[in-house]
């Protein structure tokens, strides 16, 4: 496993992060623990979760991923960098979501309880909430750090201009600064190379992308004319299944995956390994978040950490997916 500095924090994190978005719905506690063990044995020291996980959870299931994480971490908290996120829907009350001061201060306390820890290393806004004044959100995040409940703060699913504005407001008001950004990024979705990544490099922000395999499409498990019964593209995960279908389930994407698989076979490497190695070869990327619903799914992706992607292969991957760097390629 390779390690790197997390933005300007001084923390040393593994180049691969374990994501827990399936834990508690697609993945039961026993398999979740096996996945934790496999990642830890491979050298992963960075865990990312969220209060609203597992993906597609109903109100009886939200928070299970944090609960599983907390139980697995018992007795070994000091060996891992722990990140979670707040802002998702956590109840039926109209204020039980979003980035208002009320919700965020409630949300961090609830996350710490589920995780059974005194603090998290990184607390992130799960999404941008335009309904709340940005300054109110930033002041709430500053309060969370000053209270000792989080060491650092970051964002997920932010556009570059909103993140730039937030950093400017934090600097102007002398508030705790965001240190990281968590965007969706993979061979089939490259838009953030245009503005977000240059901003992150200029501001020395850690970049920890999620969805490196495009919900599993880059594993060659799916066919366009099929109806998945399991996984990110299925009804198993409710609205998330529909969202992932809208993002990737298109003729063009399947044609691209066929070309990528042909390239992978030409170089005698699994496509998931190449897809993650391609992300790691980008100088903007700090650590790639790997998800898994079954332990065996980590085999190829964990192998990317110690794989030196040949320059020729990187160029070929770039060229085959260049159209997904343009704004009109978004789904």
Image (cartoon, rainbow, N blue to C red):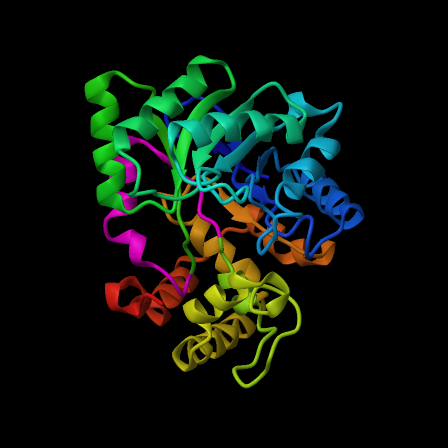
In magenta segment, residue 201: yes
* x 49%, y 37%: residue: 85
In magenta segment, residue 188: yes
Q: Position of residue 8 (x, y in %)?
A: 37, 25
* x 30%, y 69%: residue: 329
- The quadrant of the picture occupied by the N terminus is top right
Number of numbered callouts drawn: 0
Q: Please tell me whether residue 50 is drawn above or below residue 241 in the rendered image.
A: above
In the image, which residues are magenta?
A: 187-210
Which of these two is toward me, 236 or 38?
A: 236
- The quadrant of the picture occupied by the C terminus is bottom left
* x 67%, y 42%: residue: 64
- Side of 46 relative to 244 (left or right): right
Q: Position of residue 313 (x, y in %)?
A: 43, 63
Q: Position of residue 281 (x, y in %)?
A: 42, 49
Q: Please tell me whether residue 203 is drawn above or below residue 184 in the rendered image.
A: above
Which of these two is toward me, 127 or 287?
A: 127
Q: Please tell me whether residue 139 is drawn above or below residue 16 in the rendered image.
A: above
* x 38%, y 47%: residue: 157
């Amino acid at each position: 496993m390779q390690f790197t500095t997390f933005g300007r924090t001084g923390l040393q994190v593994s180049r691969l992060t374990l994501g827990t978005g399936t834990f508690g719905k697609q993945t039961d506690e026993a398999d979740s623990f096996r996945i934790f063990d496999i990642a830890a044995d491979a050298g992963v020291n960075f865990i990312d979760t969220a209060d609203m996980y597992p993906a597609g959870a109903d109100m009886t299931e939200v928070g299970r991923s944090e609960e599983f994480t907390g139980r697995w971490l018992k007795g070994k908290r000091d060996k891992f960098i722990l990140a979670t996120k707040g802002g998702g829907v956590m109840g039926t009350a109209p204020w039980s979501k979003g980035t208002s001061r009320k919700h965020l201060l409630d949300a961090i306390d609830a996350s710490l309880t589920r995780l059974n820890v005194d603090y998290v290393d990184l607390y992130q806004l799960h999404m941008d909430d335009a309904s709340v004044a940005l300054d109110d959100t930033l002041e709430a995040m500053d309060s969370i750090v000053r209270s000792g409940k989080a060491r650092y703060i970051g964002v997920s699913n932010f556009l570059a201009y909103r993140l730039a504005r937030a950093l400017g407001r934090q600097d102007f008001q002398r508030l705790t600064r965001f240190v990281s950004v968590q965007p969706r990024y993979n061979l089939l979705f490259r838009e953030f190379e245009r503005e977000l990544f240059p901003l992150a490099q200029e501001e020395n922000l850690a970049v920890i992308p999620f969805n490196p395999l495009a919900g599993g499409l880059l594993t060659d498990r799916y066919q366009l004319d099929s109806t998945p019964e399991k996984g990110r593209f299925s009804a198993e995960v409710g609205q998330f299944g529909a969202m992932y279908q809208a993002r990737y389930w298109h003729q063009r994407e399947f044609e691209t995956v066929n070309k990528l698989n042909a390239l992978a076979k030409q170089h005698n490497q699994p496509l998931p390994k190449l897809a993650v190695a391609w992300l790691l070869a980008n100088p903007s990327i700090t650590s790639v978040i790997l998800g898994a619903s079954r332990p065996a799914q980590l085999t190829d992706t964990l192998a990317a950490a110690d794989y030196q992607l040949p320059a020729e292969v990187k160029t070929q991957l770039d060229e085959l997916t260049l159209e997904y760097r343009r704004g009109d390629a978004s789904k």
